[in-house]
């Protein structure tokens, strides 16, 4: 098997405030997970899909995946997710021991266009060890002391340094890796957890892997808050998507 898609979909989605875990929340009548899988399998470049789902929704995830994969020749497996995202990715990775390349794609980035998956894969196939889709930062970004946001007597919080936004990138998914690099990255994280790690490329960088950025896409927004769901619904009305 050449390319496997790993989809962590076991988050609770507390910030979305929906009645169901986030990946199973409907968008235009279909779960976020269905949309996320559809964009990836439409590339025709994915040989296997592994979803990490909440224990109680493993059967439902398998049904959603079968529907999203449709006629594409692509194997599907659903594994139980873990307490954190890294654990869910590691569980999915264990199910594809023979893959050459893996794409790790958050179910929450449900409208990622196939072209983004293909850009990531192209860089991987050209020899990159770790690839992420990125976008420029448009807001000014400031830091707070020790990440705590110390309150002031004037109200609000004390701001510290300013970051040069021209040197910053917003990172999306799918993130692509050679399987071996991702496996070693998760093994290191398991042995010596990095509490600040929020994505797989960060774990791979700890091994010394070079992380390559390719252009992302604004429509690959991560559904986190209710407003994101409303934006995604509007995007789906775009016939170009
Ligand atoms: O919480 P956040 O939006 O950062 O989660 C990103 C992705 O990781 C989501 O698709 C979510 O379902 C998944 N996740 C997971 N297992 C967890 C926590 C999050 O698969 N324990």
Image (cartoon, rainbow, N blue to C red):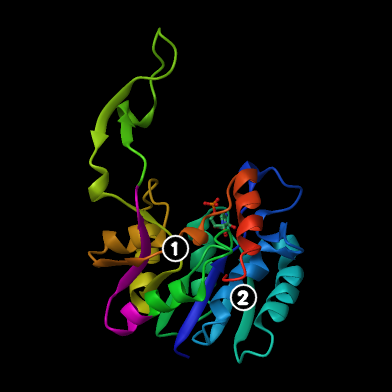
Find residue 214 and report its horizontal and vertical position in percent: 33, 68
Mark in front: 1 vs 2: 1
| Residue 102 appears in the rendering | yes
Helix, strand or loop status at disc 2: helix
Residue 136 magenta: yes
Query: Which quadrant of the view contains residue 54?
Result: bottom right
Pick the quarter of the image with the C terminus.
bottom right
Query: Which quadrant of the view contains residue 24?
Result: bottom right
Query: Which quadrant of the view contains residue 200?
Result: bottom left
Compared across the picture, whether 237 is left or right of 149 comes to right
Q: Which residue is mark 1?
A: 217
| Residue 98 appears in the rendering | no
User: At 57% from the left edge and 71% from the top edge, which residue is drawn?
Assistant: 240
Q: Determine which of the numbered discs, if any, sits on residue 38 in the image.
A: 2
Question: Closest to the observer: 169 or 20?
Answer: 169
How many other residues sit within 10 Å of disc 2, few (<14), some (14-19) or many (≥20)? many
Compared across the picture, whether 47 is left or right of 158 comes to right
The quarter of the image that holds ligand 1 is: bottom right
Helix, strand or loop status at disc 1: loop
Q: Determine which of the numbered discs, if any, sits on residue 65 in the image.
A: none
Q: Magenta span covers which residues?
A: 122-137
């Amino acid at each position: 098997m050449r390319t496997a898609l790993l989809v962590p979909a076991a988050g609770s989605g507390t910030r979305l405030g929906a009645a169901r875990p986030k990946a199973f929340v409907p968008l235009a009548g279909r779960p976020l997970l269905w949309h996320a899988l559809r964009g990836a399998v439409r590339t025709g470049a994915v040989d296997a899909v592994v979803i990490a789902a909440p224990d109680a929704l493993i059967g439902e995830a398998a049904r959603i995946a079968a529907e999203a994969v449709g006629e594409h020749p692509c194997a599907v497996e659903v594994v139980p997710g873990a307490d954190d995202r890294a654990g869910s990715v590691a569980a999915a990775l264990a199910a594809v021991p023979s893959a050459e390349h893996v794409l790790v794609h958050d179910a929450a980035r449900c409208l990622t266009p196939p072209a983004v998956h293909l850009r990531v894969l192209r860089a991987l196939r050209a020899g990159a060890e770790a690839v992420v889709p990125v976008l420029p930062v448009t807001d000014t970004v400031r830091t707070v002391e020790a990440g705590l946001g110390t309150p002031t007597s004037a109200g609000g919080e004390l701001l510290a340094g300013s970051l040069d936004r021209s040197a910053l990138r917003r990172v999306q998914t799918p993130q692509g890796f050679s399987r071996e690099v991702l496996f070693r990255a998760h093994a290191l994280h398991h042995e010596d957890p990095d509490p600040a790690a929020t994505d797989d490329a960060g774990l791979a960088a700890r091994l010394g892997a070079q992380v390559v950025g390719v252009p992302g896409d604004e429509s690959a927004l991560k559904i986190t808050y209710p407003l994101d769901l409303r934006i995604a619904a509007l995007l789906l009305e775009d016939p170009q998507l």
